[in-house]
């Protein structure tokens, strides 16, 4: 594998998912909810998962995002 191909893999499978989760409004707020014992919000949690797992973490994020949408559709909202 040459250097260009390696950089493309890093950008597509690690950096792009991080940018997507960081900028997505569906990843939740950066601050924790009132009364939470954890100092991190949902967005930071998703970012940690994606940083550590890369594309697999991004797929987990996408799966959770679509599950929330399907649950809202079932409730009629």
Image (cartoon, rainbow, N blue to C red):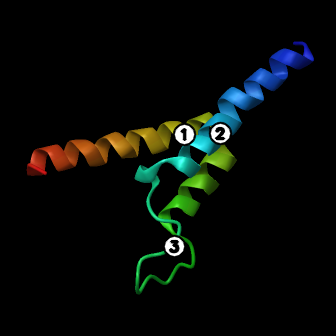
Q: Residue at x 70, y 38 (%)?
A: 15
Q: Earlier in the sequence, mark 3 or mark 2?
A: 3
Q: Residue at x 56, y 41 (%)?
A: 20
Q: Secondary structure at mark 2?
A: loop
- Residue 35 locus on image (x, y percent): 41, 87
**Residue occupied by mark 3:** 31
**Discs 1, 2 touching: Cβ within 8 Å:** yes
Q: Report the Cα–Cα distance between label 3 and label 2.
A: 23 Å
Which of the 4 quarters of the picture holds residue 63?
Answer: top left
In this rendering, is residue 27 above or below 15? Answer: below
* Residue 71 placement (x, y as % from top left): 20, 48
Residue 58, x across and y down, in percent: 54, 40
Residue beneath label 1, please? 58
Label total for image: 3
- CA gap between label 1 and label 2 equals 6 Å
Can you tell which of label 3 and label 1 is closer to the viewer? 3
Q: Give how far across and how far down residue 50 sits, in percent.
A: 61, 46
């Amino acid at each position: 594998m040459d250097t260009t191909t390696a950089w493309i893999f890093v950008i597509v499978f690690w950096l792009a998912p991080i940018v997507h989760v960081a900028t997505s409004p569906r990843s939740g707020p950066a601050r924790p909810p009132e009364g939470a014992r954890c100092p991190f919000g949902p967005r930071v949690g998703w970012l940690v998962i994606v940083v550590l797992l890369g594309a697999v973490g991004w797929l987990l994020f996408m799966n959770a995002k679509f599950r929330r949408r399907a649950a809202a559709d079932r409730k009629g909202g």
